[in-house]
Image: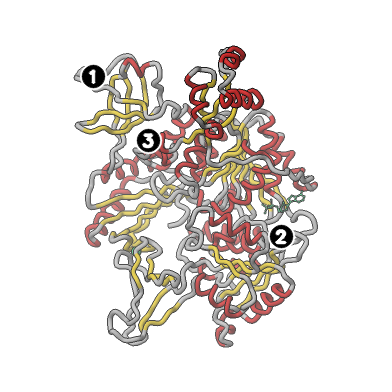
Amino acid sequence: MFAKVIIEYATKKLDQTFIYKVPLVLQAKIKVGMKVLVPFGNKKIYGFVLELSNKAEENFAIKEIEKIVDEELVLNEELLQIADYLCTTTLCPKISALQTLLPSSFKAKRQKSNYELSDTFVKLNPEANIYAYQKNNARALRQLAIIDQLEKNGSMLKKDLASSSLNTLINNNVVLCYKVPKYRLNQNKGQAHRVILTVEQDKVYKQIKAALNHQETFLLYGITGSGKTEIYLKLIADVVKKGKTALLLVPEIVLTAQIVKRFYQEFGSQVAILHSALSEGEKHDEYLKIKRQEVNIVIGTRSAVFAPLENIGIIIIDEEHSVTFKQENTPRYNAKDIASFRAKYHNIPLVLGSATPLLETKARADKKVFTLLTLKSRVGKAVLPQIHIVDMLPELKRRNHILSALLKEKIQKRLEAHEQIILLLNRRGHSTYINCSNCGFIYKCPNCDITLTYHKSSNNLICHYCGYQKQKDNLCPKCGEDGLNYYGLGTEKLEEFVAREYPEARIIRMDQDTTSKKGAHQKYIEAFLAEEYDILIGTQMVAKGLDFPKVTLVGVINADNSLNIPDFRANENTFALLNQVAGRSGRKELQGEVVIQTFNPDNFVIKCVAQNSYDTFYQTEMNIRRQLKYPPYYYLIGLKVVGKDYHKTLAEAQKIKNYLKTKVAQETIVLGPTTALILKYNNEYRFQIIIKYRFDEELKNILKEIDTMYVLNKDINVEIDVDPLHL
Ligand code: ADP
Ligand code: ZN
């Protein structure tokens, strides 16, 4: 028996397959889709079995497969098809696609035993003559006591009984030991609080339920607080009742906390969760639970879309507009596309939920490719919050740099009423740059062409792109004077300011810096929910999906941060962010308010947010996209040409552009090369070519050809991003 194996090189992602002999001992076990260890040169290297056959194609000395990495770990037919799909759609190498399908604990060279925990139990041997043993050992009182206990309890943890008497019983074959896999995350069902769906919710629920036996994609467009999660719960309960499984994707780890809690309450240990804040061991356990079909619901972030669920009955993507569903490095896939592939494979519904659908999604719903379902009102007595726009220019003159007079006053009122407040500032750290007033010196990253952000808690200057850090100096490193001044506002400085302004208020800050510890997200959310704090300050992390009944005021400190990013999606992302964060206010009985501070009060995005008008925003933005030939009117592909030498890289980018021009279809537009948004990143220069097209059958082949040309080039790298979410 022979196996075709695709191997994992350490460095370059090169697709190469080799034929290996399957040794006799492995022949009964080996399957297509298994990970194996094979000899390669004088090394041992990992690979995946792609084919098995009885005839070898070549005749020279064929080496033998060394071992199967893990017999439980088989990529099934569906996952292998997904790997092919990833290759053709994102133009990635097959080996990257295959690796992406497995959690990282399987990629590492570490041993399986490091991850898998188990408990040892003991029980009476059903084949032993216990009665006779008791009679013959009438004076071994300890042994008799253990037998009594086991008779009463059936089985017990070995460590609870550990003693020499137990060992004697085991040696005499009266007691048996056995292992039970132990998972790190374990949840029992809680008090399920049944809600009765509102008329509006019920209508949506029934419509999707009627589609459970065929493929249909739904856009569930429901305003914030309209109760989408409850609909997901009901649908998933139905699917599980039918003996099928369900997959729910959420955009952020922070969001998993609240949703997972709700699902644990309802379904307990039937739920597995997958996201990057789990430890390697936890991820490994959750993956095995799914693989062993011990759970039937998976909730997770982007990569959970590859969960090895069988017999899926529904796939739901919450906050479908989120950019986090797109992976930013190879393979540059979008979890929504994979979800769509799987929904077709299983012939089941795919539900895309959002209060601010991505333009592409809404456009497809308008064209009836997707079925549009709408939730127009909040649940119960809750209504959408009142939104105030504050022009910050006059505020600056009144020396209100950080908080406007209006926001200050409203914070004071809500504090007095013992209600809660969320303040959004989309920038972490203390000051966004430090500038010497004496010589004009500015701290910049030595590897990237951007300024360093000051983080006061660690007294470090940090590059938010490459992670470079250095200690801050007391005196200017250039002129030696005491002239260093702090500019630009980050969450750390905002927290300081708010604490000074409201000394009585209890404040927490949630951003990447404060939540890097495992479990921190969850702890913060629980504490805020338990009203241990009055004000929650945070980056976009606090904007999405969270449900705090006591929050009645949301303040957006600087709405322009995201509006000013030079990207075709800046408007769309800003609208979604502001609408989302506004949606955190007044979700239950208490009426909510929102204050948005901006230097662009007349900008149509801000105005649409204030009027809570997704439809107006959608129409206006669609017009802009049509004029500028952006998605959803045109498809987009971004090429980055990356290299250490500025001129060589630019010249190469020009060459690629010229080549493309001669090859692409006539209506296809090739733009650039221009400098990327961050030209120098990690000591490499990056030039960008943008392709806009509508129909171009050959385009992906041409790009694949270009990609292959540069795989072995040491100086120049080409990164291709199909359907980028930003440029
Ligand atoms: P969305 O995800 O649409 O923003 P949620 O699903 O978080 O909204 O629901 C908002 C709040 O309303 C939650 O606290 C939820 O528990 C509650 N809720 C949802 N549906 C109902 C219902 N039918 N009856 C009572 N409360 C509900
Ligand atoms: Zn840097």
- Residue nearest the viewer, comparing 66 with 370: 66
In this figure, what is the number of numbered marks?
A: 3
Callout 1 amino acid: Glu
Residue 613 visible in the snapshot = no
Please report the residue visible at 63 percent of the width from the left and 24 percent of the height from the top: 148
Side of 404 relative to 699 (left or right): right
Relative height, residue 242 to residue 535 (above, below): above
Q: Position of residue 137 (x, y in %)?
A: 56, 17
Q: Is mark 1 within 8 Å of ligand 2?
A: no
Q: Is residue 290 left or right of residue 64?
A: right
Q: Earlier in the sequence, mark 2 or mark 1?
A: 1
- Sequence-earlier tag: 1 or 3: 1
Label for residue 549?
A: 2
Query: How much space separates mark 2 and mark 1, taking CA atoms?
Result: 69 Å
* Number of the front mark, 3 or 2: 3
Relative depth, front residue between 346 and 552: 552
Q: At 30% across and 14% down in the image, what residue appears?
A: 55
As drawn, the label of residue 58 is 1
The residue that disc 3 covers is 111
Whether the residue under disc 2 has CB within 8 Å of ligand 1: yes
Left or right, 30 with reference to 497: left
For the residues labelled 1 and 3, the Cα–Cα distance comes to 34 Å
Q: Position of residue 454 (x, y in %)?
A: 41, 72
Q: Amino acid at mark 3?
A: Gln
CA–CA distance in space, label 3 to label 2: 46 Å
